[in-house]
Amino acid sequence: MADSEFSPKFAPFFSFAGIAAAMIFGSMGAAYGTAKSGIGISGVGTFRSDLIMKSLVPVVMSGIIAVYGLVIAVLIAQDMQPPPTQNMSLYTGFMHLASGLSVGLAGVAAGYTIGIVGDAGVRAYMQQSRVYVGMILILIFGEVLGLYGLIVGLILNSKSHG
Amino acid sequence: MASRRGQGKSYAEAVASPVPEKPSDSDVTPAVPTNVIFKLLGFSVAMISLPIGMYFIAVKFGASPTVAGIIAAVAANVVLFTYVYVAWQDDRLEREAETKKNNKKAQ
């Protein structure tokens, strides 16, 4: 495709913005989730060190949020070619930006939920062991928010080079 | 107090002679059992390498990038649920061992 009204020179800018948004926002969500739930786990560990292993679940879930961002970033990056071989349309660039933003900001939402639920849930679990199943369920529902972002991002990304 | 130092030996002799080995009654086993550490290390490595590895393996076997992305996300969730299961199992075994110990004490 030649350089035209529909594929201007600055179109790849939006694709790279999408890559950056997926990675940066996804990592921000994962970082908040890890840090906030880590505070709770440290607080529990000083009193009941035998619960640490089971309390690490929110940290693993935060890691998954970052993996979602990573998947979208890798997918967009593999569509990119330097200009002489590929002149991408502005539509494709915006689509990449949308997929990156959707997975990134959904990751922030999921990470925020996992952080707060992880902190409070782990502390409650220290005093009442039946909270565990409920805590895992709430964490999974928080995690699913990030998964929705990933699904929308994947659909947008697969449509972008149709 | 000074007269008791070294029990008849000079200070230099006391330093030169090997220290008598006292039977230590302090618990020197690591606070976290090694099998737990290996488990956590294994899950860390799996969490880092499995999703992205599955993505590239799927792409190599001819899956479309979108399908490969879905496979990577599924792999990450499989690791998570394996972790929850292993932690659950660990806790159950520990609790069973504790009740056994308590029963022995009661007898």
Image (cartoon, coloured by chain):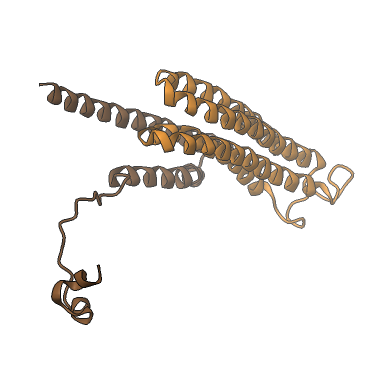
Chain colours: A orange, B brown
B101 versus B27 height, above or below: above
Q: Residue B15, located in which quarter of the rendered image?
A: bottom left
Q: Nearer the viewer, residue A158 or A56?
A: A56
B5 versus A162 height, above or below: below
Q: Write the residue at 55% across / 39% down.
A: A34
Q: Quadrant of the N terminus of chain B?
A: bottom left
Q: Is any part of residue A162 visible from this angle?
A: no
Q: Position of residue A159 (x, y in %)?
A: 69, 33
Q: Write the residue at 43% across / 38% down.
A: A46
Q: Is residue B89 left or right of residue A46?
A: left
Q: Is residue A56 left or right of residue B67?
A: left
Q: Quadrant of the C terminus of chain B?
A: top left
Q: Write the residue at 29% across / 49% down.
A: B30
Q: Position of residue A152 (x, y in %)?
A: 66, 29
Q: Is residue B13 left or right of residue B57?
A: left
Q: Nearer the viewer, residue A102 or B102?
A: B102
Q: Nearer the viewer, residue A121 or A12?
A: A121
Q: Most extreme residue toward the right, as rendered?
A: A5
Q: Write the residue at 50% across / 33% down.
A: A58
Q: Nearer the viewer, residue A128 or A108?
A: A128
Q: Position of residue B84 (x, y in %)?
A: 40, 30
